[in-house]
């Protein structure tokens, strides 16, 4: 039966199959006494069933209040049906093709006959068939079973799942509590969702927040969820998709094979254990991360990371900060300022500014740069350039670290592998044996070093002490070095000044080096330019070629010893020093005294005042002009300048290129090997070189007015003014003299040349060559009695039977000479003092009007005479010419030519024929003699004791006197 209401009505029906309502509000009540019945309604606002087992079919669109029905079905799928349940004690209803169900105030259960979407309000439970979508129109709690999706209201919605469904999708639902078999919960829209008893949550495309509500903790798989907040229990979150996720209150986090970035929101008091997580961004709280499996982990604002204790854990800081690590093998910092504390295990760090160990850790630097370290037993550097600063004093082993900066305390650094290291404020360094150590401090630094091959100083004042075994080390820029046991050898790599103590030897650099001995008695240097020796008796050995300046000589107890190389020693301070095997010594500005330590030294000296030889074959070469005193020197070689050598001990000495030698008060012999100009004072014997020309100047003696010297192979001897000097020739030779008073030849074959006008007494001299001035030569009585002269104005004989030979034409005055032989040129002989002189080849003989001279012509020839008392001709034909008026006694003259005055000729021999001209008076020797007089020219002549007269072709007048 179908009932149609024409006006709004409230109707009770029974056995009616269908009701069509009016346009007003229609209320239909079914008879409750009947059996279960089905009812169809249309345009009815309210229907009440009988016993709760009825089926209601709603035709068309409807908003209907329904109570007491077991099933409510819409007629068409396109109709909009909104059902409001009115059961006072709650409904348990099955619906189909119903769009909306509004529950009662009691507990309602809605069962969906098919998987259509439905909206509910105040419904406590919805049971679907597996694919239904339920939309909650009002906030509240709802249980679902067999529902695919739940769309929450605008308020707080809590969904409880039951039954055997394993998946559920929700949107705008705040809480999902699983009591059934639910495994996967999918969030359809972004939002915040609390879950309990859920195995997996799949987030939406937006920003999702999942709160884990299990108080005892749970394990949750999440995918595409941006935030997971754990419960108060111990929670494990397994990320099913890579990407970014924030977590809070989660104790265990497992990532995927992809790349996850996890942000910690805090809420965990202990450590968070992570696995397969690539990046963790810490919270504002103290975050502690434990790596559950080995791998690479990037962190930011994380305070602590514990590794797996495997060999390949790597933690990388994304943001600058501080981090503690345990059992992490590699820690990588940022470009900012990072600090890592290694609590347990050894670690390699890279990009950290500070690394702190626990006291037993080993630290390896993964990249170059500067880092502060503390409490590591060893530090191994990277392949780059590393600079390590020690925060706290201690002992640390280093390898491959380029720079080590010590703490403010006492630091000991051990270098484990050979290399170069720069240190600062490190008190002790123990090297590997071949290390290069550079000191960095700009202020004073004291460091103890062992096993370093090279030590390079800082710009400040560096003090280096070698400890352990004796060192053979190279140094540069070190101001003070103390050796280990006195056997250390130092090599200076760069020029500079260095003070040493307890060091055996120092090898200088290629520059200018200064080495000062602070203490010790012996030092060997090689290539060091300046050495300041210590006080006391010091032996300095110059072990290599080059020049060294030595300062600090005092007391005469110091020694300088050379090697087979060519060494030059310059005395930086004056004093006395013993020298051995040194090639050159340069004196200081004061008074320097050298003692040659062996008897066969060859040495060059410059600006040295005294040299004491050892009585052997010492050879000294002067490197500078000046004055020097010598003793027991075999050979002395001067410079091109002016040298004055004073002999301190009588000896024989050979000199070359020396200008002056002052002898001792004993017998000194000087041999000149280089020739040239040479002066002596107080030297008894001078021997020149046979192949050079030597000029010897005799200096005035220190006392007295006489001096004597024997010379040999000396070409010239120049005397001192005001001193009477006697030169003895050691062998006959040609010698030139000046200002010499006496010269004694050897065997009578010497030739003496006068270099300046003056008087010279000679003996055993063959010839004398005069100067351009007026020369007077005195012949000393000797067994030779023969002398030749040239250019000499006066010769004074000894009164013995001397023969004077004129080697050149000219005028000469002689006295007390027995015989004069002319030069072959035009000779003018002046006789000084009464004498009888034999002449030969002399053109003119001049006597004195105040003395009586007798001249004997040794060979025939012509001679002109003046003021001669007697002229005795030779056995040949002699022609005498009178140069002035006077009386001449003649003998064996063939011709006599008178002067322009009145001449008187007394003939001394009878029976001689003589020719005369210009003679006014001729007297024969005796009346018994027969004289034949031939007049060569006219004139008047007075004759006496003349037997025969032959006139000339001119007119002559004879007057005979009886």
Image: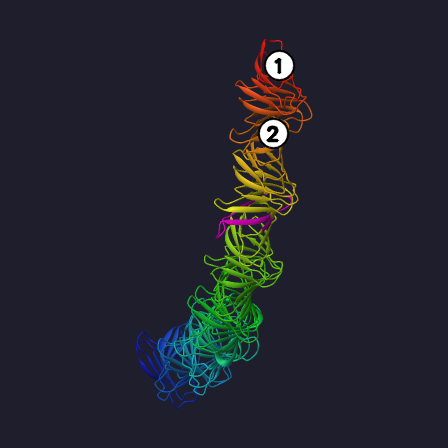
Against 753, residue 462 (above or below) is: below
SS state under label 1: loop
Which mark, residue 855? 2
Towards the viewer: 549 or 489: 549
Q: Is the C-beta separation of discs 1 and 2 under 8 Å?
A: no
The one of 565 and 791 positioned closer to us in this rendering: 791
Given residues 159 and 300, the one toward you in this image is: 300
Residue closer to the observer: 511 or 747:
747
Which residue ends up furthest to the right in the rendered image?
875
104 up-or-down from 772: above or below: below
Query: Does the magenta-highlighted stretch encompass residue 615?
Result: no
Is residue 675 found left or right of 290 in the rendered image?
right
Q: Earlier in the sequence, mark 1 or mark 2?
A: 2
One can see residue 417 in this view:
no
Is residue 718 in sight in this rendering? yes
* Mark 2 residue crowding within 10 angstroms, few (<14) / some (14–19) / many (20+): many
| Residue under the image location 69 percent in, 24 percent down | 876
Q: Please tell me how crowded label 1 is: few (under 14), some (14-19), or many (20+) other residues with Cα within 10 Å.
A: some
On whether residue 687 falls in the magenta region, the answer is yes
User: How was this image coloured?
Assistant: rainbow
For this orientation, the residue located farthest to the bottom is 33
Corner quadrant of residue 908: top right
Query: Magenta residues, as a range?
Result: 685-710
**Residue 688 location (% of width, % of height):** 61, 47
Task: State the image quarter where residue 933 is shown.
Answer: top right
The residue that mark 1 highlights is 936
Residue 228: x percent and y percent?
44, 77
């Amino acid at each position: 039966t179908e009932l149609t209401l024409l006006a709004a009505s409230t109707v009770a029906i029974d056995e009616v199959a269908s009701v069509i309502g009016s346009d007003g509000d229609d209320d239909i009540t079914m008879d409750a006494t009947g059996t279960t019945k089905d009812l169809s309604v249309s345009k009815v606002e309210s229907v009440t069933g009988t016993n709760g087992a009825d089926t209601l079919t709603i035709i068309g669109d409807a908003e209907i209040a329904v109570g007491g029905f077991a099933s409510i079905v819409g007629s068409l799928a396109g109709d909009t049906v909104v059902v409001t349940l009115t059961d006072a004690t709650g409904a348990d209803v099955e619906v189909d093709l119903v769009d909306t169900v509004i529950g009662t105030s009691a507990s309602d259960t809605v069962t969906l006959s098919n998987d259509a979407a439905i909206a509910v309000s105040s419904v406590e439970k919805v049971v679907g068939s597996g694919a239904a979508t339920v939309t909650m129109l009002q906030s509240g709690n709802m249980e679902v079973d067999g529902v695919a999706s739940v769309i929450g209201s605008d308020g707080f919605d809590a969904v409880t799942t039951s039954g055997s469904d394993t998946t559920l999708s929700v949107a705008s639902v705040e809480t999902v509590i699983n009591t059934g078999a639910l495994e996967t919960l999918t969030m359809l829209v972004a939002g915040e969702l609390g879950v309990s008893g859920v195995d997996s949550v799949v987030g939406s495309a937006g920003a999702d927040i999942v709160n884990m509500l299990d108080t005892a903790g749970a394990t949750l798989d999440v995918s595409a969820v941006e935030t997971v907040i754990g419960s108060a229990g111990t929670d494990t979150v397994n990320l099913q998709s890579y990407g970014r996720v924030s977590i809070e209150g989660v104790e265990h986090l497992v990532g995927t094979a992809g790349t996850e970035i996890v942000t910690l929101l805090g809420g965990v008091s202990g450590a968070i254990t992570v696995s397969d997580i690539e990046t963790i961004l810490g919270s504002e709280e103290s975050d502690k991360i434990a790596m559950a499996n080995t791998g690479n982990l990037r962190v930011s604002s994380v305070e602590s990371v514990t590794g797996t204790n495997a060999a390949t854990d790597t933690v990388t800081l994304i943001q600058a900060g501080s981090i503690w690590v345990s059992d992490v093998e590699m820690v990588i910092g940022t470009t900012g300022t990072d600090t890592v504390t290694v609590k347990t295990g050894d670690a390699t760090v890279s990009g950290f500014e500070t690394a702190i160990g626990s006291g037993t850790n080993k630290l390896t630097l993964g990249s170059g740069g500067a880092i502060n370290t503390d409490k590591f037993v060893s530090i191994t550097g990277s392949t780059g350039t590393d600079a390590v600063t020690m925060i706290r004093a201690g002992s640390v082993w280093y390898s491959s670290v380029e720079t080590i900066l010590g703490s403010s305390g006492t630091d000991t650094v051990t270098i484990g592998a050979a290399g170069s290291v720069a240190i600062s404020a490190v008190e002790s360094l123990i090297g590997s044996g071949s290390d290069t150590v550079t000191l960095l401090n700009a202020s004073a630094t004291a460091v103890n070093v062992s096993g370093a091959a090279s030590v390079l100083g800082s710009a400040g004042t560096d003090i280096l002490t070698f400890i352990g075994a004796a060192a053979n080390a190279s140094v540069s820029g070190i101001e003070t070095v103390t050796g280990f046991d006195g056997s250390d050898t130092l090599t200076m790599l760069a020029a500079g000044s260095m003070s040493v103590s307890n060091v055996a030897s120092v090898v200088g650099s290629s520059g200018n080096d200064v080495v000062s001995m602070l203490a010790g008695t012996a030092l060997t240097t090689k290539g060091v330019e300046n050495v300041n020796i210590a006080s006391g008796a010091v032996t300095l050995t110059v072990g290599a070629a080059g020049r060294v300046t030595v300062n600090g000589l005092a007391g005469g107890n110091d020694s300088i010893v050379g090697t087979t190389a060519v060494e030059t020693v310059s005395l930086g301070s004056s004093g006395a020093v013993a020298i051995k095997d040194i090639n050159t010594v340069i004196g200081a500005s004061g008074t320097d005294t050298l003692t040659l330590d062996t008897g066969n030294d060859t040495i060059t000296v410059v600006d040295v005042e005294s040299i004491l030889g050892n009585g052997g074959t010492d050879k000294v070469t002067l490197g500078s002009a000046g004055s020097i005193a010598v003793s027991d020197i075999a050979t002395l070689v001067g410079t091109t300048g002016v040298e004055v050598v004073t002999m301190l001990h009588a000896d024989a000495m050979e000199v070359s290129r020396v200008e002056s030698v002052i002898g001792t008060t004993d017998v000194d012999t000087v041999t000149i090997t280089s020739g040239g100009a040479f002066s002596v004072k107080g030297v008894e014997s001078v021997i020149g070189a046979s192949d050079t020309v030597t000029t010897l100047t005799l200096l005035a003696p220190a006392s007295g007015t006489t001096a004597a010297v024997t010379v040999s192979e000396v070409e010239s001897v120049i005397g001192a003014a005001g001193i009477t000097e006697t030169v003895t020739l050691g062998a006959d030779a040609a010698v030139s003299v000046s200002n010499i008073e006496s010269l004694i030849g050897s065997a009578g074959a010497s030739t003496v040349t006068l270099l300046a006008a003056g008087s010279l007494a000679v003996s055993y001299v063959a010839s004398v060559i005069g100067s351009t001035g007026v020369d007077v030569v005195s012949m000393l009585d000797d067994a030779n009695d023969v002398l030749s002269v040239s250019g000499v104005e006066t010769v004074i004989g000894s009164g013995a039977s001397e023969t004077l030979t004129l080697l050149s034409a000219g005028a000469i005055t002689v006295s007390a000479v027995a015989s004069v032989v002319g030069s072959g040129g035009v000779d003018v002989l002046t006789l000084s003092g009464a004498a009888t002189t034999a002449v030969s080849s002399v053109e003119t003989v001049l006597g004195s009007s105040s003395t009586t001279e007798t001249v004997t012509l040794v060979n025939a020839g012509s001679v002109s005479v003046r003021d001669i008392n007697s002229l005795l001709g030779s056995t040949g034909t002699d022609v005498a010419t009178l140069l002035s008026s006077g009386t001449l006694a003649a003998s064996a003259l063939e011709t006599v030519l008178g002067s322009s005055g009145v001449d008187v000729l007394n003939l001394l021999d009878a029976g001689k024929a003589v020719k005369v001209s210009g003679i006014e008076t001729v007297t024969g020797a005796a009346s018994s003699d027969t004289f034949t007089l031939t007049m060569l020219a006219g004139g008047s002549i007075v004759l006496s004791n003349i037997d025969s007269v032959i006139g000339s072709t001119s007119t002559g007048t004879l007057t005979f006197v009886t």
